[in-house]
Image (cartoon, rainbow, N blue to C red):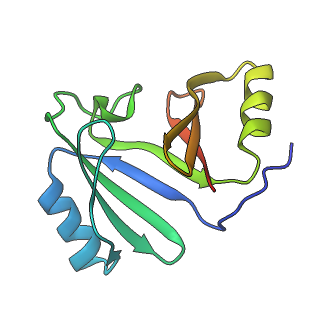
Amino acid sequence: MDIQLSKQAIDLGIVTNNGDAMVHFYRDILGFVEEPSTPFPMGGQMYRLNCGDSLIKIVVPAQPTGASPAPGPIAAASGYRYWTMRVNNLSEIMAYCEAAGVNIVEPITEVRPGVTLGMVEDPDGNWVEFVTYT
């Protein structure tokens, strides 16, 4: 299997109930460059911070989570929840994962015009997101 990356870095999503402190740490202490924040599609806010070619996404759900980091949906808990690869061959990757028996947690879905994603679960329950931008 050959994953054809369209970006030579990863995007990391961190879900937290402590948005102000998390943004402060990554932006003000570590020096990541802040982009404009955006609404999170599942409710809440996403703060986007660049580190070189990688992007750290601090997600503050609309409703605070009541759990510590654990396997499951993105907004189910705080902590490191998923990471993202931008790819050019999303359909091929998802078909390959499905054929290999990988748990598909989000089938190929257009989340907004020009943005299509699919997500799988690793053996520990961590989620990996593949995204195509057209």
Q: Is residue 100 or residue 35 the one in the foreground?
A: 35
Q: Is residue 94 above or below residue 57?
A: above
The spot of residue 6 in percent (x, y) is 70, 63
Residue 89 picture location, percent across and down: 76, 47
Residue 129 in the image: above or below residue 48: above
Where is residue 98, by image quadrant?
top right
Q: Is residue 86 left or right of residue 36?
A: right
Q: Position of residue 36 (x, y in %)?
A: 28, 69
Tell me the residue at 80%/30% (across/down): 96
Q: Is residue 130 above or below residue 76?
A: below
Residue at 63% x, 56% y: name it.
134
Quarter of the image for residue 65 reads top left
Q: Give the residue drawn at x 50%, y 34%.
A: 126
Give the total number of marks visible in the rendering.
0
Q: Quadrant of the N terminus?
A: top right
Q: Residue furthest right?
A: 1
Residue most toward the front? Answer: 113
At a point 16% along the width and 28% down the height, the residue shown is 66
Left or right relative to 112: residue 48: left
Q: On the image, which quarter does residue 35 sit in?
A: bottom left
Residue 86 x, y percent position in the rendering: 62, 56
